[in-house]
Image: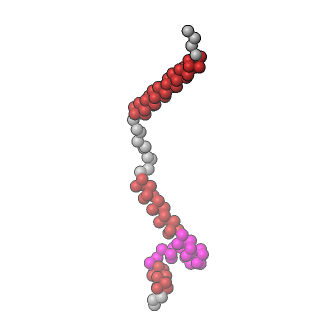
Amino acid sequence: MATDPKSEKNKTRAEEKERKKVAKQEKKGTKKAKKEKKPKKGRRRILPIWLRILIVLLLSALALVLGVMVGYGIIGDGNPTDALEWDTWQHIFDIVTKTE
């Protein structure tokens, strides 16, 4: 009996494809199992978010005060500490709203 070499090659190729497919499925199964076994780690923060927000607000307020003092004292040729007095701000408000 003579066997056809092409049909044997086709059978072996089909078998090889099937083996590769099974191997891929097994790999996927082991990867999923490894992922599921790992407990998810929580992130430990050095500074909590609420503290970061508070620090940013404080630094912003400090920058505002320093900017007012530089603007009034150095650029405006006044005393930098006068920029922090209420009378100065009342005078500026009166000028802006044009009240006497």
- In the rendered image, is residue 80 in sight? yes
Please state the total of marks drawn on the protein image.
Answer: 0
Q: Position of residue 86 (x, y in %)?
A: 44, 78
Q: Position of residue 38 (x, y in %)?
A: 41, 33
Does 41 sit above or below residue 24? below
Q: Specify the color scheme.
A: secondary structure
Q: Position of residue 69 (x, y in %)?
A: 53, 72
- The residue that appears at 46% across and 82% down in the rendered structure is 93
Residue 41: within the magenta?
no
Res 52 quadrant in image? bottom left
Does 47 sit above or below residue 86? above
- The residue that appears at 58% across and 16% down in the rendered structure is 4
Which residue is at the front of the view, 32 or 12? 12
Magenta region's main secondary structure? Answer: helix
The magenta span reads: 67-87
Does 44 sit above or below residue 70? above
Furthest residue in direction bottom, as rendered:
100
- The residue that appears at 55% across and 9% down in the rendered structure is 1
Quadrant of the snapshot with the C terminus: bottom left
Furthest residue in direction top, as rendered:
1
Does 52 sit above or below residue 8? below
- In the rendered image, is residue 16 in sight? no
- The residue that appears at 59% across and 78% down in the rendered structure is 77
Q: Position of residue 85 (x, y in %)?
A: 46, 76
Which residue is at the front of the view, 90 or 79? 90
Residue 85: within the magenta?
yes
